[in-house]
Image: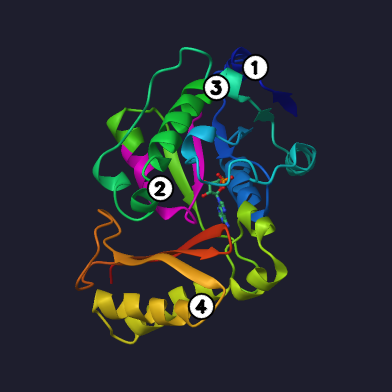
Amino acid sequence: MIVTSDIDEVRRQRWVEPGLTWGFVPTMGYLHAGHLSLVQLSLAGNNRTAVSIYVNPTQFAPTEDLSTYPRNLAGDLALLEEAGVDLVFTPNDAIMYPPGFQTTVSLSQVTQPLEGSSRPTHFAGVATVVAKLFNIVQPTRAYFGQKDAQQTIVLRQMVRDLNFNLEMVIGPTSREPDGLAMSSRNALLSAENRAAAPVVYRALNAAKAAYNAGERSAEVLRQTMRAMISAVPQARIDYVSAADPRTLQELEVVADGVLLSTAVFFGQTRLIDNILIEED
Ligand code: AMP
């Protein structure tokens, strides 16, 4: 496994054998089984697999958890080596944002609701760094998790708009046995908050059950989630949403699929999760 922070070295490796397909899994490290499930999809679908590990400062607001974001490069590299990854790109801020850097990739409609309304600068940071990573690695396919539902929609839109020559593949959300979506941020939860956090997925499932029982009022679905989450004293709701899965606008009536999603604070730690219900 090649581990490098050198952009030219990544490009050289990528094009040693131009006929080979490359899968690419961008991450911020502190890898868990969710990341590794994307790595497995890439290994199964491509001749070579590259992973990036980079905690991108431009997608964190000044008030957010950049400085406490968990990191464990040695542990991450051991997991990736064991999985059979071919190349790991581990840049730093000076490599990604050298002095004089001045370009931002920003999208309009799809970045505004949900995560974008709570984190107004987040998606410009994500789109900019992912555009850079795509240009550096030049993968055949790129792998992202459904866990970050809006991110998948934003990045698909960017790929379309900027004509990136790659295929986007979205993998399902990996969960702990109690249903909590795996996240590097789970490591930041106190024991008490960790015990309370599965309410997020329980609430999404309660809304899904209501939908399956015939409920089509989006407000009732949102209220179902709100009631369950706010019954847990450790939980502080940022938003609950029942939105159009394509535009991410809040629905009144569910007619053609719905993205149920929520962001909830437990202490300082903000967790997100979602369930996508496709159209009937
Ligand atoms: P991150 O390191 O949090 O930036 O995540 C890197 C990639 O892994 C993103 O595409 C995430 O959507 C994906 N990911 C994070 N958590 C999970 C999970 N629990 N299941 C599946 N994919 C995930």
Q: In the rendered image, which residue does mark 4 sit on?
A: 202
Q: Bounds of the magenta span?
A: 139-157
- Whether 238 is drawn above or below 63: the answer is below
Percent across and percent down for residue 252 are 19, 71
Pick out the residue farthest to the front. Answer: 63
The one nearer the camera, 90 or 88, is 90
Query: Does label 1 or label 3 sit earlier along the sequence?
Result: 1
Please report whichever mark, 4 or 3, sits nearer to the chain's N-terminal start: 3
Circle 2 or circle 3, nearest the eye: 2
Q: Is mark 2 within 8 Å of ligand 1?
A: no
Amino acid, disc 4: Arg
**Secondary structure under the numbered disc 3 in the rendered image:** helix
Spatial separation of the CA atoms under disc 4 and disc 3: 39 Å
Q: Nearer the viewer, mark 2 or mark 4?
A: 2
Q: Foreground residue, 44 or 205?
A: 205
Displayed quadrant of residue 21:
top right
**Identity of the residue drawn at 49% across and 83% down:** 231
**Image quadrant in which you'd find residue 258:** bottom left
Q: Is residue 188 in sight in this rendering?
A: yes
Query: Mark 2 = which residue?
Result: 119
| 3D distance between C-alphas at marks 1 and 2 | 31 Å
Q: CA distance from mark 4 to mark 1?
A: 44 Å
Cα–Cα gap, marks 1 and 3 = 10 Å
The CA distance from mark 2 to mark 3 is: 22 Å
Q: Earlier in the sequence, mark 2 or mark 4?
A: 2
Specify the quadrant that holds the N terminus: top right
Give the residue at x 47% y 55%.
146
Which amino acid, mark 3? Met
